Image (spheres, rainbow, N blue to C red):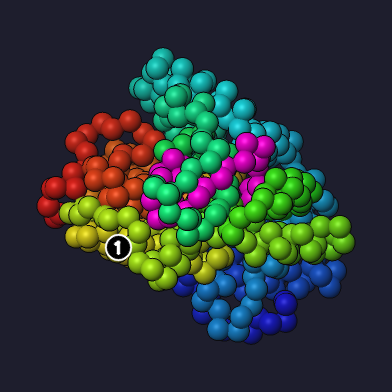
Amino acid sequence: MIDDCVHCGFCLPTCPTYQLWGEEMDSPRGRIYLMDLAERGEIGLDGPFTEHIDACLGCMACVTSCPSGVRYNRLLEATRPQIERNVRRTWPDRLFRDAIFALFPYRRRLRAAAVLGVAYRKMRVPRLLARTGIARRLPARMRAAEELLPPVRLRDAFAALPRRTGPPGTAAPRRRVAMLSGCVQDVFFHQANLATIRVLAAEGCEVLVPRAQGCCGALGLHAGREPHAAARAKRTIETFGDLPVDHIVVNVAGCGSSMKEYADLLADDPEWAERARRFSAKVRDVTELLAELLDEDGPAAPRHPIRARVAYHDACHLRHAQGIREQPRAVLRSIPELELVDLPEAEICCGSAGIYNLVQPEAAAELGRRKADNIRAVRPDALVTANPGCLLQVGRYLGDELPLIHPVELLDAAIRGVDIPHGPPPAQGAAVSRKSSSR
């Protein structure tokens, strides 16, 4: 796959780090050149090699733009585990990365963190840190973690999703699906999960939510922690694999991308390879499934008009990794009177990229500010995007300027005839009404 790259440069305008720094070794073709040198033993894995690979967001915009069909994602996913196995990181770096993976894949620990986060905000510690200037003196990684801490309603963080939800009335379901509730998604974006269930049921689906599910392994896979990812992939397959469902629905772009790659992740495991292939074939992003249903029979549930100008931000693992670009737009355009607008530089990552905004905070901050400026440029009433990391990253730089929500939350509002929700952060300004006129 390394030899497939002809170094044409079509990837350069879409690569976030090349756009930031203009360094050849921080472009896809430059990193492929480094991989080639390392494979031939001409350079070691430590030092500059690891620095340039770590600086990559893994956004896969280069895969979409490459005319030669180079699978840079496969190259990156083969390279990062080699770094994790063979390069000894500094102890602060190891400690920080280990802390991330000791928290985020575990829902109970996230709920405990949510309680601490609520107490942290109620005690007005963020305001104290800002007023005293301490916040500016914090290490960049700690400052990023503090600023990305999402406001959360504890009743949402501890709420359980219904185990089974059927379509209204007595009609036979159009589809029977099982839903991944996620880790960060279910604790910090529980309302998006509820909206997903309501929308799928309204569109004629029976929705199952297995209680025993856990982390799907997406963060580990994208960070090169292959054993972590493989173990959680197997557990997810065990949880969902034998359910009598047509599809396994995911409303998180990064999770869906990883679950569709289980067949590749477990390809060399004879006990799991075929099970993983069958599992991955069933995985659908929620907008992907909703678009299929629209194409087949049209909407089952009437939509109320939403008179608002809404910007759509493509999550990288939806647009580039899964190739899902038109389906979310088609689903949103099924809402009467909604004005849907695209963003300038839509192909450029917002800087979230899994754990990237925590481990590479300076680059992520530049990209986050750039994305926020592009959002402001189109003057929307709300922003929708299909990944919790994107919502947190963009929210860090937009604050309370406008509602930031998942696409299914907007569709849910249209079906129920309610105002555009504000998402997880408590509403601090006037809600955008579906009766208000757009700018």
Image quarter where the N terminus lies is: bottom right
Q: Is residue 125 left or right of residue 91?
A: left
- Per the image, label 1 sits on a secondary structure element best described as loop
Q: Outermost residue, top direction?
A: 123
Percent coordinates x, y for residue 396 in the rendering: 40, 41
Q: Which residues are magenta?
A: 192-219
Q: Amino acid at mark 1?
A: Ser
Q: Outermost residue, front direction?
A: 170
Q: Nearer the viewer, residue 411 or 388?
A: 411
**Which residue is drawn at the image coordinates 24% and 42% (left, top)?**
418
214 in magenta = yes
Q: Nearer the viewer, residue 314 or 27?
A: 314
Q: Is residue 412 left or right of residue 265?
A: left
Disc tally is 1
Percent coordinates x, y for residue 271 in the rendering: 86, 57
Residue 372 to residue 212: above or below:
below
